[in-house]
């Protein structure tokens, strides 16, 4: 797995370090060479001096083979440009953009750009979104307090019921896709192998969902 982090501020540094510790291939882009001093001395990832919306910088960072990109600079417009370029031109599968202004965040979400709000999303949550291979975030609501995610039913849930994956106010199963056909499940609906499940998840309940799936 290869992830690009655009912006080597506090959040970008934490995210890059977290990914690197897990053995993920990481490239960090920042226009200021001094910013890379925030990274630990033996940081194994690639450091690219440049602007995140500069195609040459993205190519040097390995955008053509990237599995995900997080643009977490301090400028909303820059993050939107980088996210759009990564998604639409380079077809990066998972892209998230840090947006500080709530109004812009809402607009960008409507334009299809996955948005993270620094007040509610830390490096751990961004890492989860980019590096968790079995989960896909379809969209976020508000400032990231609620996400709708999709994943394939893990072996331990096959034969179990929707009620076993439901936590009132925290985790709600919205849709079940079986053999390409979608349904709104009942609490007594049983999960089958290869089912795709779409779940509304309160941000604070992510660890609880992980424990139910593992």
Image (cartoon, rainbow, N blue to C red):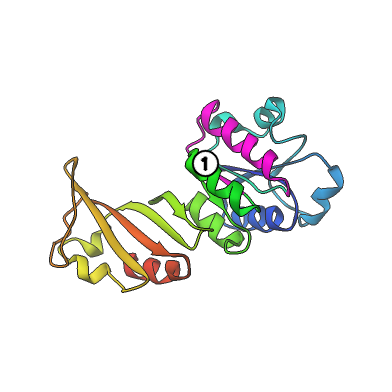
State left or right for residue 8 relative to residue 83: right
Residue placed furthest toward the right: 34
Element on which disc 1 rests: loop
Q: Nearer the viewer, residue 6 or 158?
A: 6
What residue lies at 67% left-to-right and 34% top-to-bottom? Answer: 61
- Mark 1 = which residue? 113
Q: Position of residue 168 (x, y in %)?
A: 31, 74
Query: Which contiguous range is marked in magenta?
Result: 74-98
State left or right for residue 127 relative to residue 6: left
Q: Is residue 137 above or below residue 58?
A: below
As for residue 207 lying within the magenta part, the answer is no
Q: Position of residue 16 (x, y in %)?
A: 66, 52
As for residue 89 lying within the magenta part, the answer is yes
Q: Position of residue 196 (x, y in %)?
A: 26, 50
Can the viewer see residue 106 in this picture?
A: yes
Q: Position of residue 125 (x, y in %)?
A: 54, 60
């Amino acid at each position: 797995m290869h992830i690009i982090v655009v912006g080597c501020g506090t959040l970008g540094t934490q995210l890059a370090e977290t990914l690197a510790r897990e053995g993920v291939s990481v490239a960090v882009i920042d226009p200021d060479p001094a910013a890379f001093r925030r990274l630990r001395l033996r940081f194994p990832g690639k450091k690219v001096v440049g602007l995140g919306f500069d195609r040459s910088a993205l190519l040097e960072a390995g955008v053509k083979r990237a599995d995900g990109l997080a643009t977490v600079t301090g400028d909303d417009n820059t993050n939107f440009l980088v996210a759009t370029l990564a998604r639409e031109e380079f077809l990066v599968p998972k892209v998230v953009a840090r947006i500080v202004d709530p109004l812009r965040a809402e607009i960008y979400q409507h334009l299809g750009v996955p948005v993270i709000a620094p007040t509610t999303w830390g490096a751990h949550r961004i890492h989860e979104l980019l590096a968790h291979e079995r989960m896909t975030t379809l969209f976020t609501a508000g400032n990231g307090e609620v996400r709708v995610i999709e994943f394939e039913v893990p072996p331990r849930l096959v034969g179990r019921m929707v009620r076993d994956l439901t936590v009132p106010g925290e985790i709600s199963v919205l849709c079940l896709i079986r053999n390409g056909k979608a349904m709104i499940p009942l609490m007594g609906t049983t999960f089958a192998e290869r089912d795709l499940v779409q779940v509304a998840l309160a941000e604070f309940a992510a660890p609880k969902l992980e424990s139910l799936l593992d």
